[in-house]
Amino acid sequence: MAAETGTGGHAAGMFKTLRTDAWWFEPLWTGLGFLIFTIYANYEMMKGDNYWFSNGAHGFGGYLSPFFSPLLFADTRVWAGAPVAESFFGEAPTWWPTWFPSISAALILPLPLSFRLTCYYYRKFYYRAYFMSPPACAVNPAPQPGKYEGERMLLLFQNLHRYALYAAIVVLGFLSYDAFMSFFRDGVFGVGVGSLILTLNPILLGSYTFGCHAWRHLIGGKKDCFSCDAFNHDKGMKKSYGAWRAVTWLNERHMLLAWVSMIWVGWTGLYVRLVASGAITDFSTWGN
Amino acid sequence: MAERNFRVWRGDADGGEFVNYKVEMEPGMVVLDAIHRIQTHQANDLAVRWNCKAGKCGSCSCEVNGKPKLSCMTRVNDYAPEETITVQPLKTFPIVKDLVTDVSWNYEQKAKIQPLQPRPREADGTHRMQQEDVDRIQEFRKCIECFLCQDVCHVLRNQDRKDAFVGPRFMIHLAQLEMHPLDTADRIPAIKNEYGSGLCNITRCCTDVCPEHIGITDNAIIPLKERVVDRYYDPVMMIWRAITGAGAK
Ligand code: SF4
Ligand code: SF4
Ligand code: FES
Ligand code: FES
């Protein structure tokens, strides 16, 4: 006979549980995985070089790293930066110190970052892995300063996730343009390994973005009745119900797509960096 | 047949302790079978609630090795042969005796919720709905009210905010009513204020434990949160409503 404290014998104290499985494994790998990506994104932003590859050609086409897209300013002072013609506002301001985070990346990265940080999946993952609220199911959470308020009070901003979605859709447009551009070098159509990597990037990001809960709501989930649409009784139902079903299909895979698309962004950036710096060769129809 | 070790919590609201039992095993046994065997052979006064033994009545909810489970649907051989299986009552509700808890708080929550308020019948005296319009809410009707989701939800279980949050089971009930094509009531203000949709931090433990595999968080709570955003937090929609007077249900 083993005596235990507490009515019901439930474990008391932080992170205590009677679970016997490896409940700590998921918060650990997700916590580390996201940390590694964040470190890499910061590295790209701080380095601010090797984000463009067109093998020296100046005509239309080339590979642009997703960490710098859309390219607001081209910094000609760094190694393998994009040509000025590719950027929206031309040359990066010269008063911007080179040892500082790249101005292009620093202005752009907050958009996808805020999208992911307010994503309903990422919220689950970091409330569990970082806030330990709770770290896993039926595991005692970290102590709460004051009364638990959930997503009210300090976390009220999470309710603006749909605005981050709108920004993400715009960025997705630019990344799709980058994918198109990657099939050209000096105005000549062709295919390189980089083209395929840069094309898969917006496809994966799009599958993640359009599986968003806010999108699922706006596309039709907000309706109580799909078939009651005044504008077209029959077709109206098929349209909004069909769209909602399609988004639901992606939504059911949202967690997987969140990870795969994030890893692929990192890999695309790394690939452009490796090719631009000459560390590896990009096999392509243009010859190297 | 082999014997297995069980550790069952025995006691009442004033306290208690874990008691070890050795139980003779038969093929295909579930945890509830083992509890019944203990009751028959070793502890006639062991209190346990059950009814269908088929995962459909939601009576036998308890915690097995720390996880909220239906004891009638939890197979003993899911656990390694040498592992001691620990069986406890639910944590979130007051204990009556041994494995039996008083879940009446849940019924009080349900009573607070405004029931379906259907629009008037059509001219021929019927109510018509399309299958596409009720697909979503049929999922929520699978709920067997086992309250495992209520038990695991940290808002109720650990943060003790029963005063401010009705819990996942009633969020799906609310979603079922709010998404109903015939319903005319507006529960959005109550969902935000009284029922506490903002208390849920979408960590999805309710979804993880639901024996009916209802997408509680993704299909009910998040869609309700988005409806609350429409009404209370989306500045563009709020301005649009102010100008056009549209959008009110
Ligand atoms: S997702 Fe929300 S309702 Fe479900 S267990 Fe977590 S906090 Fe509770
Ligand atoms: S939603 Fe699932 S876990 Fe919750 S009471 Fe219903 S059946 Fe049980
Ligand atoms: S819910 Fe994940 S992106 Fe919107
Ligand atoms: S006894 Fe009915 S669900 Fe287990």
Image (cartoon, coloured by chain):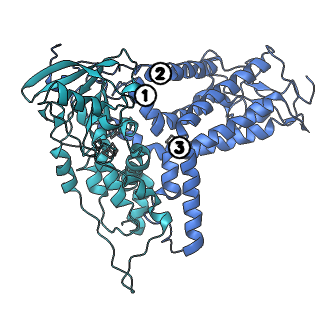
Chain colours: A blue, B cyan
Q: Please say if the residues under marks 3 and 2 sit with CB atoms less than 8 Å apart.
A: no
Q: Which residue is mark 3?
A: A252
Q: Where does residue B244 sit, x and y in percent of width and height?
A: 42, 68
Q: Residue at x 42, y 43 (%)?
A: B213
Q: Residue at x 83, y 35 (%)?
A: A61
Q: Relative to A27, say whether B62 is above or below.
A: below
Determine if marks 1 and 3 fall on one subunit.
yes
The residue at which mark 1 appears reads as A126
Q: Is residue B105 visible?
A: yes
User: Considering the numbered disc 1 on the image, is that residue within a helix, a strand or a loop?
Assistant: helix
| Residue at (39% x, 18% y) in the render | B81
Q: Earlier in the sequence, mark 1 or mark 3?
A: 1
- Which residue is depicted at the point 39% across and 20% down? A21
Separation of residues labelled 1 and 3 (CA atoms)? 19 Å
- Which mark identifies residue A31? 2
Chain containing mark 3: A
Residue type pointed to by label 3: Glu
Quadrant of the drawing holding the N terminus of chain B: top left
How would you rate the neighbour count of disc 2 (Cα within 10 Å): few for under 14, some for 14-19, many for 20 or more? some
Find residue A107 and report its horizontal and vertical position in percent.
58, 32
**Letter of the chain that mark 1 sits on in the rendering:** A
